[in-house]
């Protein structure tokens, strides 16, 4: 099994916070190849036979365990699509860390598209963290077009942290979720684009049964000449509650299109959306500059606080 080089290890730290091999279950992937895998008594990882990817089976009752499945690319011109399916039993409490880092120092585009599906049993809690990161001084693009599908059974909760702060030239993130009785989805997205980058975030959440709820919040910053489209949709088919929020800072010649939408198919559905786009307030900059910061330092501090 190949070892990871210094660039790949740096990417691994950026997207998964790993300085070393993690505890618990994991599947590490670099330049289209597996570079490490571990299973536990409660979490099994198997290679798919019909497509590139893995199946992760989490036994009912599994608690306080984790699964890490990060991907790193350091080979210019490499393009891959990976299909990963998670089968989570009842009464679980598990952390799942994914994400992809691309370092492209060449002239060809590099792309990774992770297609993740979650089948979550009853009364379980899943925390899912997916981070995207790009680096490298080549002219080839760093492209990430992930798809996440979540099917959440009765009484279960899924918390999703979706982060893309640096270096990705083009991304289209699609998230689809369907929730049953008393199920809950919480999404916190943080996004920053710069240069000529473009990013599109699409969320379509269906609250199918009574007591289901969703809270989808996206915070973003568009700098230079970058473009963002935020398309957040909640569909209420029962006695349910849903909230979407797009909160964005626009700078330089950036462009942002926010498209929050709600669809109520029941008189008992309670759905709310909010959208706000604006520049950094001058009084915020002045206040920080009176404390000795330059204008650039003040801007960076405001942005860092906004995207926390």
Image (spheres, rainbow, N blue to C red):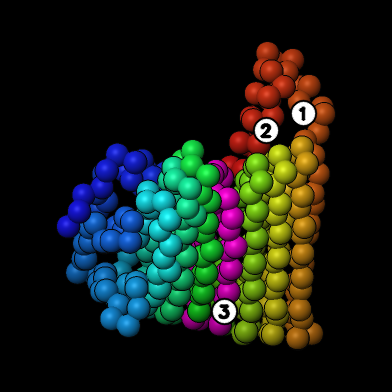
Given residues 194 and 204, the one toward you in this image is: 194
- As helix, strand or loop, the secondary structure at mark 3 comes to strand
The residue under label 1 is: 284
Please tell me which residue is depicted at 34% across the width and 41% down the height of the picture: 7
Q: Is residue 154 covered in magenta?
A: yes
Q: Is residue 162 above or below residue 121?
A: above
Q: Is residue 208 above or below residue 170?
A: below
Please tell me which residue is depicted at 69% across the width and 85% down the height of the picture: 237
Percent from the top left, x then y, of residue 90?
38, 78
Q: Is residue 238 visible?
A: yes
Tell me the CA gap for discs 3 and 2. Answer: 36 Å
- Disc with the residue nearer the chain's start (1 vs 2): 1
Span of residues in magenta: 152-180
Given residues 238 and 234, the one toward you in this image is: 234
Q: Quadrant of the N terminus?
A: bottom left
Tell me the CA gap for discs 1 and 3. Answer: 40 Å
Please tell me which residue is depicted at 47% across the width and 65% down the height of the picture: 113
The residue under label 3 is: 179
Q: Is residue 129 visible?
A: no
**Residue 94 appears in which quarter of the rendering?**
bottom left
The residue under label 2 is: 302
| 248 left or right of 19 in image | right
């Amino acid at each position: 099994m190949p070892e990871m080089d210094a660039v790949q290890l740096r990417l691994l730290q950026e997207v998964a916070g790993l300085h070393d091999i993690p505890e618990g279950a994991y599947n590490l992937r670099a330049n289209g190849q597996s570079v490490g895998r571990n299973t536990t008594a409660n979490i099994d990882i198997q290679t798919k036979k019909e497509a590139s990817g893995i199946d992760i089976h989490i036994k009912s009752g599994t608690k306080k365990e984790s699964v890490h499945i990060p991907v790193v690319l350091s080979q210019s011109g490499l393009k891959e699509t990976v299909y990963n399916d998670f089968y989570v039993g009842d009464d679980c409490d598990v952390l799942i860390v994914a994400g992809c880092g691309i370092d492209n120092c060449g002239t060809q585009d590099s792309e990774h598209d992770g297609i993740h599906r979650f089948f979550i049993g009853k009364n379980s809690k899943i925390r899912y963290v997916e981070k995207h990161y790009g680096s490298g001084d080549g002219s080839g693009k760093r492209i990430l077009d992930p798809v996440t599908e979540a099917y959440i059974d009765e009484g279960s909760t899924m918390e999703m942290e979706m982060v893309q702060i640096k270096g990705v030239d083009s991304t289209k993130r699609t998230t689809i979720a369907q929730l049953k009785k008393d199920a809950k989805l919480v999404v916190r997205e943080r996004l920053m684009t710069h240069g000529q980058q473009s990013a599109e975030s699409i969320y379509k959440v269906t609250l199918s049964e009574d007591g289901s709820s969703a809270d989808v919040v996206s915070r973003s910053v568009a700098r230079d000449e970058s473009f963002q489209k935020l398309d957040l949709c909640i569909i209420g088919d029962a006695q349910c509650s849903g909230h979407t929020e797009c909160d964005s800072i626009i700078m330089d010649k950036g462009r942002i299109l926010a498209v929050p939408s709600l669809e109520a198919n029941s008189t008992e559905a309670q759905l709310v959306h909010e959208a706000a786009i604006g520049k950094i307030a001058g009084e915020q900059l002045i206040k920080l500059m009176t404390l000795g910061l330059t204008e650039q330092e003040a801007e960076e501090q405001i942005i860092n606080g906004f995207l926390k």
